[in-house]
Amino acid sequence: MAPRRGPAPGPPPGRRAGWQRAAAGMAAARGRVLCLFDVDGTLTPARQVRGSRREEGDGGVGAARPPFRPRGLSPGILLPQKIEPEVDRFLQELRGRVQIGVVGGSDYSKIAEQLGEGDEVISKFDYVFAENGTVQYKNGQLVSKQAIQDHLGEELLQDLINFCLNYMALLKLPKKRGTFIEFRNGMLNISPIGRSCTPEERIEFSELDKKERIREKFVAALQREFAGKGLRFSRGGMISFDVFPEGWDKRYCLNVLDDERFDTIHFFGNETTPGGNDYEIYDDPRTVGHSVQSPQDTVQRCREIFFPERANEY
């Protein structure tokens, strides 16, 4: 579902009362509708590389807001971006009409940093699903936490790690750095160049990858080696890809939400094409998928859907 362009049309004068009744009914039905949002590129600006010109900001027209800067990060780290105040305010207004939640691939601490201060995120959202939903919060409380090692077992996990290390050891690249495998709660993130590369090295690898299909060939080798083992793979930005158990993509959170018996679950994400980490949940029949291009696009789409009586104001 592609994002709409331009301002939404306002209701004809004779139908304003109808829009008002619909809005009142929508407010009454808050408990039966959930809006579920991706984080990066959907509620917050896309991540910036520390040390890049856009990260520092050039002061020009449309310059990006400086990103959140965690202490202790070396150059080359992809920094999370903080939510813009106007987007944050709109979400709380939206929460008056529907329940809201977030689902991201990052761990809880990164999502919390992006969407608030401290642990504000679990009070701002009815549901918080970190690491594709393998870490679950509801109404401010931790509900459950899964671990990939418990699901796969140590033998398969070590076979996977060893295969990746052996494969990367044989790769000849212009540059190799460090952190080739990042072990997360619900997935492994694999980077042939290493996640500690500089911004320039990141770009150099990305351009080479477009020509040589380094990650695509790596994934194909993993699919052959681990066929029938219940593993899935998805894009992980410019230099990496993710490996996780079958069903542990963002659809994992839907298994929890099935018990909540919502009438409708709207999902908003920006990586909704095949291979993107929003694709599976966007395409799932349990959700109404909305493909967006920025936080501002997300806000506009929500205004059109959930505030129809005020659509002509924007």
Image: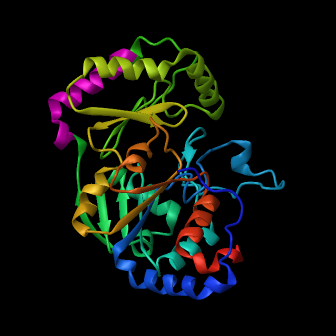
In the image, residue 189 above or below residue 174: below
Residue 83 visible in rendering? no
Q: Residue drawn 27% across and 66% down?
A: 142
In the image, the segment drawn in magenta is 149-167
Q: Residue drawn 59% across and 17% down?
A: 211
Q: Is residue 143 left or right of residue 176?
A: left
Its colouring scheme is rainbow
Query: Looking at the image, which is closer to me, 298 or 43?
Result: 298
Residue 275: quarter of image: top left
Residue 140: quarter of image: bottom left
Report x, y in % for residue 56: 72, 50
In the image, residue 149 above or below residue 65: above
Quadrant that contains the C terminus: bottom right
Query: Looking at the image, which is closer to me, 47 or 125?
Result: 125
Q: Residue furthest right?
A: 60
Residue 115 visible in rendering? yes
Q: Residue drawn 20% across and 28% down?
A: 229
Q: Residue drawn 58% across and 75% down?
A: 308
Query: Looking at the image, which is closer to me, 176 or 139?
Result: 139
Is residue 157 magenta-colored? Answer: yes
Report x, y in % for residue 236: 47, 37
Q: Main secondary structure of the magenta part?
A: helix
Q: Is residue 149 left or right of residue 266?
A: left
Is residue 23 magenta-colored? Answer: no
Report x, y in % for residue 190: 40, 30
Residue 302: quarter of image: bottom right
Report x, y in % for residue 107: 39, 52
